[in-house]
Image (spheres, rainbow, N blue to C red):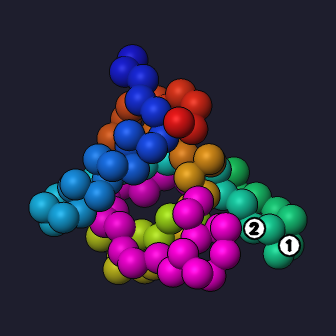
Amino acid sequence: MSLLKAYKALDRMRESTKANIPFSFEYISCNETDATSDGLKKVQRALLRTGYSRSKGIKSQSLIAFTDADTGKPGFFYLPLLMKYNEMLLCGNQ
């Protein structure tokens, strides 16, 4: 199984999005408002979208915005909770 670092995966997501090529990923959900999680989530086909401005706080760098290409629904995930990118397992968050 291939291993990839989270920031390298994010770079690849950006490249795929720029080329309009959807990618798959898995992440652990996290709702800080309710202090809950729905566990592991898998998105089959996604593209990144514009997220929060860096002036909006520290979360703007770790909260990644995406659109599910199959449903058109927007979503967010925390980069440290990213588990897989295109079936490649992530190791660490560097």
- Would residue 76 be found to the left or right of residue 15 on screen? right
Q: Amino acid at mark 1?
A: Asp
Residue under the point 35% across and 80% down: 72
Residue under the point 80% across and 68% down: 32
For label 1, count other residues whose C-alpha is less than 10 Å away and answer few (under 14), some (14-19) or many (20+). few
- Would residue 73 be found to the left or right of residue 17 on screen? right
Q: Quadrant of the N terminus?
A: top left
Residue 3: x %, y % from top left: 42, 23
Residue under the point 50% across and 65% down: 64
- What's the magenta region? 40-62
Comparing 46 with 53, the one in front is 53
For label 2, count other residues whose C-alpha is less than 10 Å away and answer few (under 14), some (14-19) or many (20+). few
Residue 61: x %, y % from top left: 56, 63
The residue tagged 1 is 34
State the separation of the CA atoms marked 2 and 1.
Answer: 6 Å
Asked if the magenta segment contains residue 54, the reply would be yes
Mark 2 in CB contact with mark 1 (< 8 angstroms): yes
